[in-house]
Image (cartoon, rainbow, N blue to C red):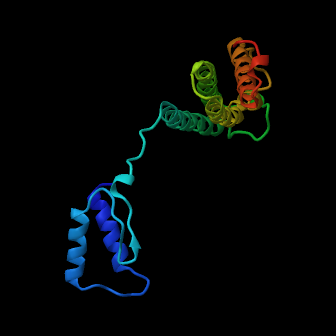
Amino acid sequence: MSRRCCVIVRVVAYFNRPDGLRPPDRTAHQTVTVFYSCGARIGVLLGFPLLSCSSVTEPAAPSAFDKARTGLWASLQKHLSTVYAAEKDFRAATRFTDTFPFSAASLEPQQLLDYQHQRAVLRDLYVDETTQLDSLVKAVRQKSYQEDDKKLLFLMILGYMDLAETVFALLDTHRPTKQEPDEEMQEAAARFERVRNFVRLNIRGISGLLPRV
């Protein structure tokens, strides 16, 4: 806060005294003049304690951790929006039934095509998100932040993973009765759970018990 801002604050306080007294305009002008001509520190004027203009400091610049936390929050929000958009489209493609697993033979050709397309979109997103989460967790682990700061970042990641998992679980529940094995998705599911367990252990402070990922 500049000295001019300090002056304005104190003048306003003066004109809003609880006893309702208001000085004449000339006094107010003199008060402002005194404020502008003061040194670094002012004592007490008319019963109002005044702040030292030099004692008001500018806000500290964000630390590296603060920037990382803000960036991670924005990134997770963006990823979560993508996941929810994929969920909306996938659920729309399965409105033909309320019973799962369903018989693919009972669907119209277009319904089956729409389902397969949206399933592929959600499935690819699952694999991609799992790969990115694995890299993200390793990056956080290698940072030189304080342990409590790392735990906060891991908590943010865990919250995202728990929410995303409720969407990706649709790949297992909303499926046809006969589904071809998908080894890549199975590997992604195992990797996702391994990364999530690692994050949980880091939050509990016992990461040393877990082998390197």
10 is higher (above) or lower (below) than 137: below
- Residue situated in front as seen by the camera: 5 or 128: 5
72 is higher (above) or lower (below) than 13: above
51 is higher (above) or lower (below) than 177: below
On the question of residue 105 being in view, the answer is no
Image quadrant assignment for residue 141: top right
Q: Residue shown at 28%/84% (left/top)? A: 23
- Residue situated in front as seen by the camera: 189 or 52: 52
Q: Position of residue 36 (x, y in %)?
A: 22, 63
Q: Residue shown at 58%/27% (left/top)? A: 145
The mark tally for this picture is: 0
- Residue 46 horizontal side relative to residue 76, left or right: left
Q: Position of residue 105 (x, y in %)?
A: 74, 26
- Residue situated in front as seen by the camera: 168 or 193: 193
On the question of residue 129 being in view, the answer is yes
Image quadrant assignment for residue 108: top right
